[in-house]
Every structure is written in C-alpha cells, then in structure tokens.
Amino acid sequence: MKLHLALVSLLIACMGFGALSLQRTDKRTRIVARCFAALGVVVSFIAMCLYVQKGDSVQNIDTWVVVQGVWAIHLGLDGTSSTLLTLAYVIYAALTMAAPHSYVTRKALQAGALTMVGVVGVLCAWDLVTFAVAWFLTALPLYLSARRQRRTQGTYAIGSLNLAFWGSVLPLIGAVVIIAVAHGGDGTHYPLSLQLDDSKPIALSWQYVAFYLLAVSAFIRAAVIPFHASLPRVVQHGPFISGTLLAGTQLGLVLFIRLGAHVLPTASYECLPFVGWLGLYSTVLAALVATAQKDLRQIVAYIIISQSGLAMVGVASLNEQGVAGALLQSVTTGLGAVGLMLLSWSLADRTATTDVTRLGGLVKQSPRFAALWFTLGIVTIGLPGTLGFIAEDLLVQGILGQHPVLALLFILATALNAIAFLRGFYRAFLGPPGRVELGALPVSVHDLVFRERVVALVLIALVIGGGLYPQPLLDHISGTVETIVRLSR
Amino acid sequence: MLHSHLTDVVTIVVVLAPALSMLAFVVLSIVGLLGPMPSERLTRTITISALLGSFVAALLVFVTLAERHWAPLHIPLGIWFSTPHYKFHLAFHLDLYSSTMLLLTTVVTLLAAKFSGTYLHREPGFTRFFMLLSIFSTGMQLLVLAGTFDLLFVGWELVGLSSVLLVAFYNDRIAPLKASLRIFIIYRLCDLGLLVGNSFLHRAGHGPEIGDLHAEMISPFWATVIGLCFLLATIGKSAQFPLGGWLPRAMEGPTSSSALFYGALSVHAGVYLLLRAGPVLDRSMIASSAIAVVGLSTAFMGTLCWRVQADVKSELAFATMTQVGLMVAEIGLGFRRFVLLHLVAHACLRTYQLLRSPSALADVNAIRFAQDAVSRRGAGPFIDHLPKTWRHALYRLAWERFQLDVFESTITAPVNRLTQVLAKQEERFTHFVDDQLAKKIQQVGAKKDLMGAAQSPEDRQR
C-alpha cells in the first residue's frame, strides 16, 4: 500500500501555511502552528522509519504529468531527504514551541510556515521545476522581510537579505533553464526529471556553466564565505523563524547532492575540489572570526558558517567517510546550532542584548539557562558520545588520508570553534556581574520556562541519542553517500 | 567453556565500572534539570554509591587478572558505528597497566569524593562538583580500559572537559575563568595530536587496537609521525615543557579536584598514552628521543621552579611536573615497566599532599608564629654548591617560570591580533553589503526614475 508520505508532508506544510494565514491573533496563530509542526514531525518520522534502504532509490513517489513527455511533477523521498525532512520539522516545531512570544508574532509565523513549505518542497521534489519553485519559496520570506524593513525604515538597510534572495534564486533558475534546454536538445524523455532512472547527464560544456550557477546558489544558502553576509544579519536581527529554519536545514548541500550528482556528474567531479577549498577557507576564517566576536548571536552565526564549510569539505572529499561525515555534520548543526540560536534569542528577549561585554554572572540568576546553553554548545562542537563527534571523526578519517594539510586546518578550525564558544559562555554566563555604570545590565534575568527547557532537552537528547546509536542514520544516508562517491569512479 | 564463562563475567564487571559513574551523572542531571537541585545528602549518596560500585568492580578485575598472572584479556564490545571502509571498534583491554590504573582511578576518585562531601559542604555548586566528578570518573576509566586508541580518545576528551570545568568551579571570580580558558585552549590544540596520530595509526598499521598494534607493520616514518603526534597530546595533557605553564594556574579549582586531576590522574593521562603507544615508539628513535628530551626538560624546569614558589599548591604543581617529566623521560628511554610503579607511587603521594595542603599551611603558620622563627631552606645540595652567578641565574629563571607565559603569548598574541583584524574586515564587509551596495542600487534606481521623468511623453510612449 502506497502511503504518499512525501505528498502528505508537503500537504501538511501547505495546509499549515493556509491555516496560519487565516488566523487573526498571535495566540491562535501560535497554537495552530504548533499543531501543524507536531503533525509534521510525526509524519516525517514515520516516513523516515518506513524508508527501506535500497541503494539510492527514491520511494513513496507521486507523479503528475503536466506536459506529456516534457514535464511531470515528481514528489518522493530518499534516505537523506527523509532524514532532513524530519530534521526540518523538528526545527520548526522547536521554534514554534520555544521561541519567545515577542518574536513569534502572527506575521513571523506565517513567514516561517511559507519557508517551511519551501523547505519541504525542496526536500521532496524530484523534478527541476518543482525544486526551483520550492527554492524560491524558501527565500521569499527573506525578501519580503527586506521590503518590509525598507518601508518601515525608508532605506535599503538590509542589502544582504536582498542579495541572499536574488543571489540564491536567479542562478538556480539560470541553471534549470540551461539543463532543460540542454536536455531538450538531446531529445531526453522528461528532461526535467531528477530521478536516477530518468535523469541523464547533459552535454559537458553546459555542465560547467550550470554547475557554477548552482554553486553560487548553494554557497549563498549555505553561507559559505564570501557569500555569507546574510547569515550573521539574520541571526542578529531576524527574521527569526524563517532565518533559523534556513540556517538549520543546510539546503545548499541538498542542492549539490540533488542536482549536481544526478545531472552534472562530470562537472561535479571536476569542480568539487574547488568547492572543498572554498569550504575549508570558509571554515577556518569563520572560526577565527568567531573567536573575536563579542555578541553571543554572532558567535553562533560564525560557528554555523564554519560548520557549513566543514560539510562542504566533506562532500568534496568524494569518499565514504567524508561524505557521511558531512551529512551527519549537517544534522548536528541543524539540531545543536538551532538550539543555541533559540536560547540566544530567548536571552535577547529577556535582556535586550546578547553583547557579552554587558552580560556576566547570569548563572546565578538563571542556572538552567546556563547549563542548557553550555550543553547545547558542547554537543554541537563534538563532545564524545554525540552526533557531532561521529561526524567529525568520519570527516577526519575521510580527509586526512587524502589531504593531510587540509585535514589539519579543518581540525584546527573545530578547535577554534570550541574556544570561541567557551569564551562566549564564560563571559556571558559566568564571572562577576558587570558594573551597571559601565553599561552592564541592571535587570534581573529569569530562568528558562518549562517549554524552553523541554525543547532544549529534546534537542540535546536527539544529538546525544544520534551519537550513541548512529548506525540507523548512517544506513539511511548510505545511498546518497554511494551516489556522490560514484562520481569519482 | 570455563574460560568463556569467566570472560563473560569479567566483561559484565568491567563494563559496570564506567557505567555506574555515568549513571550517577545522568541521574543527578535529570533530577537537577527537571526539578529543584538535589540535596547535598542525596548528591553524596548517589555519587559515592556509584564510585563504590566502580571500585568493587575494579578490585574484582584486578584480582582476576592477578590470578591469570596478568595475561592480557581483550574484550570486544562491538562496533559503535561503521561505514563500508571504516569501523569504530569498542573494546576493553585488560592487562597489568589497565587493571592497575583502573584500581588507582577508582580508589582515588572515591577518596576525593568522600573528602569533598565535607570540604565543599554548603558551597554553591556542590551538586555541580559531583556531576563533574562523575563525568571525570567515567572518562578516566574509559581512558585506562580502552582497547583501541579511538575509545581512548573518547575518555581523553571527557577527562579534559571535566577538568576545565572544575578549574572554573569558583566562577564568580575572573582568575579561575581565565585559567580554565587557558587550559581549554592548550588541551584543544594539543588534542589534535592524539586525533591525528590515531588517524595515521588507522592508515599506517592494522588499526588502532591497543595490545595488538602490529607495530612491526608500521614503517619507521609513520612510527615517527605517530609518536610525535602522541607527544604533542602528552605535552598538553601532562603539562610538559614548553606548554606546561597552565598547571600551577589549574590550582584555582577546589583542592579535592586539584588533587584528583593534577596530582593523581588527569596529569598522568599523557604518560599512560605513551605507555600504550610503546610498541610504536620502539620503531622510531627520533620519537623516543624527542620524548626523552621533553621529559628531561620538563623535569629540569619543574625542579627549579618548585623551589622558588611562594605558595604550597604552586610548589606541589611544579613538583608534580617534575615527576611527570621524569616518567615521560623514562618512557622515552624504554623503562616502561618502571613507569607504572613510579606513576602509582607518585599519584598516591601527591594526592595526599594536595589534600593536606590547606591544613599544612595553617600548621606551618601556627608553628612559625609560636616559634617566632623564620626557617631558611636551602635550594638543594647540588644547587647550593654552584657558583653564585649561576645560582642567581637559575633562581631568576625559576622565578620567571622559564618565561613559559611569554612563549605561550608569542603564539597566542599574533593569533589574537589576526582574529581582531579579521573580525574588523568582516564588519566592514557586512556593512558594505548591507548599506553601501544597497545605496548604490537605490541610487541607480533613482537615476532611472529621473531619466524617465526627463523624457517627453512622446519619447516615453515610443
């Protein structure tokens, strides 16, 4: 019996957006959003559990022919996308349930729901047009946020959000057009399909052009330096829900895997080393910048950028350990770093700042806040027994044998991330309280409320649970790993 | 059949040892996070019960191994995770070294926990101390029992994390936090050595199994690389020259944690690592020589520095550094069996001295006050006979702790400056993208509007 789980997941996201658009008060919007998020978590988890590992097969496929022989909408899930779908819904649920109420306004939740529709669409789409439309929807809330800020502030004060939108959408559309035209030229049946059985590589000359266009889109979405300007902006100023969703779901990697490996194999194989070097540059630079940051949210932002770069390096290694490590790293970043962002915004809600020079000694007023912030941080940076540790171990094993110098640099970057995190934690939460006359906070900070604690604990439990028993996850993603590694053969 | 039955029993017992400590941590965490902090009595009961269980398990293992005349016992526990060409094996290796260290770990940890129950009475963070003690106990036991270098690394990291957090125990003062951060930086950077060395071991030999390293399959080149990597890890963890300046500062933590970590166990973790890597080191004269040189340098530095310290804990820290340096040198020179005896004896003595140090200060001061006397201690029989200029030079060198702080700052200061420069560049770049680029786009858009307004209606229609 076919369960149409990909279609159902997308319908839940669409219905959620629709339902949220009809709400008139913040409170009701929150309740509706939480209900749909919880439903999405359940359905996506079922989809993940029911996925049967058979190579890189796409399962639960639904197809609607739009133009006979040319375009059919395909929705389905493979091992990696079912895992990332569950991750996306977990992140969405965590945000709707634990974010401070002042940030989960009606408009913010509607924007988040629209982003979620796009994210689910990207993960479930197996044809180019649906993929491109979904990709557009993920970026749209950022653009709308930029326009709203322009109206209220009267100026283009947020060029990075505009660039993030146009820079990620236009190159992808260009690449899709090139692939469609190239396939149309060689008479491929259903040229817009991305399924392994249907898709064929396009002509080599077009592959390079399409790959570089895709790379620009992917780099902007993955916030790889120097295409990263939007992420620190979003982490600091919002939009909170949409921005955190995009930062946590690592769609840039999905773009490389879905389009690059299936449709542009030769160009991917030859150009991935460039991606790896840029990823390494981003990893090391972001780690260095993170150690100098004085704002907790900026520290988190640059740790996310650094870890996204790690994932790029892993994929570019084109071996089993490296690619598997990269995918697990994405999951770890999605859970841990999003948890850190959530708590950082909670802190900002209480204190109106996350500047560590104005904080200090918060552990006395909010010990659980400090404990959970610390725990989320160390599970993100790879404490043994967590998913982050597995990911880093696989990355080291995968990269060290091929490029020892490259591996040493990235190990150094992970050490710097840890140092940046601990330094920020010490300055914000420990030590004597700052002196008010020097700009420190005069207000008291109340501890985490129950829902915040539960969500943080769940995220920690997922990272630790995944770390203690990672084999099911590794089996799920093995098909994708094999597809990417096959590029080198 | 009897042998397999015995192996099963030993497996269960030896797995229980670290598992009980971890269970104590988990229970205390759950209770603390979901409700009010547990009382001192409950905290003590949970932790000491778990540590007692670990001690009993360790004793059983020790006795069992002794009856087997220390014949090694390799206990595979399965595979944690695997990919087609890589497997992370979980295994314990029981022999003279690991069973002795396990017993030492459990005994000293139990004593420190018992001591701390009274020493930290009514101290804020009482439960936090025992939670970190439980993590440390788990990590240290995993480290000494590890049957693979992969698992040893897991224990190594847990030990490092708990030690850093305990140095920052008195977190309302700046000095412990600075010391803790400094130790964390040195640990993280030096732990690269263990991680990299372990990875090379995977590639160069038959895998990182302790006790079955097949060191004869490893070429001298790779043995040198791996040996030097492990030496880097030891330099960090065991406070060896030239990165050992953190050890006296680590005394900022509670006395019982100082005794446990920097007298008895954590500071010897590097020595244990080198003991386990012995077969690899035998294949490389360069690595062995480097290890001996580092150890002797550390011992020389430590023995001079402890004589000029003004407080007892710093004095004991440098004395520890001296002895650990000697142990490292012994390994480099090939006296591995002797090191185990040296390690155990030193751990016991130093633990006692550190636990006694706060009382010893009071005792000495009381005696001095009563006698109204100032005792003059010589620098030692050898140093007292040196020429005056040499004595003064050595005194100066020891007082300035061999300028290790300056050495460390020559490495960290440029990195700090680099991060500041990069952060400023980042700020400028983000500002450019956010504001300047957007303004230029706005200006271009405004120009187009103006041009449109300047055209005649007929031109616009065309």
Image (cartoon, coloured by chain):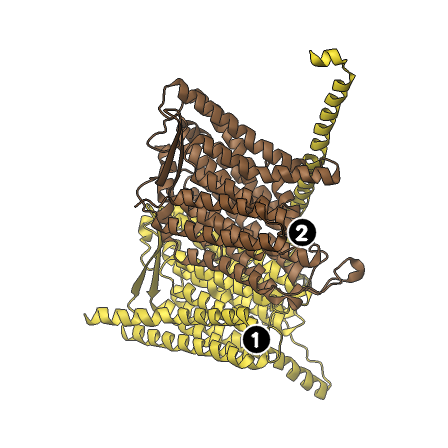
Chain colours: A brown, B yellow
Q: Position of residue A260 (x, y in %)?
A: 43, 32
Name the residue nearer the viewer: B196 or A230.
A230
Identify the chain of the residue marked 2, using the numbered disc in the image: A
Q: Amino acid at mark 1?
A: Leu
Tell which residue pokes out farthest to the bottom in this image: B370
Residue B52, numbered label: none
- Same chain assignment for discs 2 and 1: no
According to the image, label 1 marks what residue? B354
- Answer few, some or many: residues within 10 Å of disc 2's Cα (few below 14, many 20 plus, some between 14 and 19): many
Name the residue nearer the viewer: A136 or A329.
A136
Tell which residue pokes out farthest to the right in this image: A437
- The local secondary structure at tag 1 comes to helix
**Image height check: is A407 above or below B360?**
above
Identify the chain of the residue marked 1, using the numbered disc in the image: B
- Answer few, some or many: residues within 10 Å of disc 1's Cα (few below 14, many 20 plus, some between 14 and 19): many
According to the image, label 2 marks what residue? A295
Q: Position of residue B59 (x, y in %)?
A: 37, 77
**Image height check: is A336 above or below B145?**
above
Q: Quadrant of the C terminus of chain A?
A: top left
> Left or right of B232: which side holds B144?
left
The residue shown at (68%, 51%) is A294
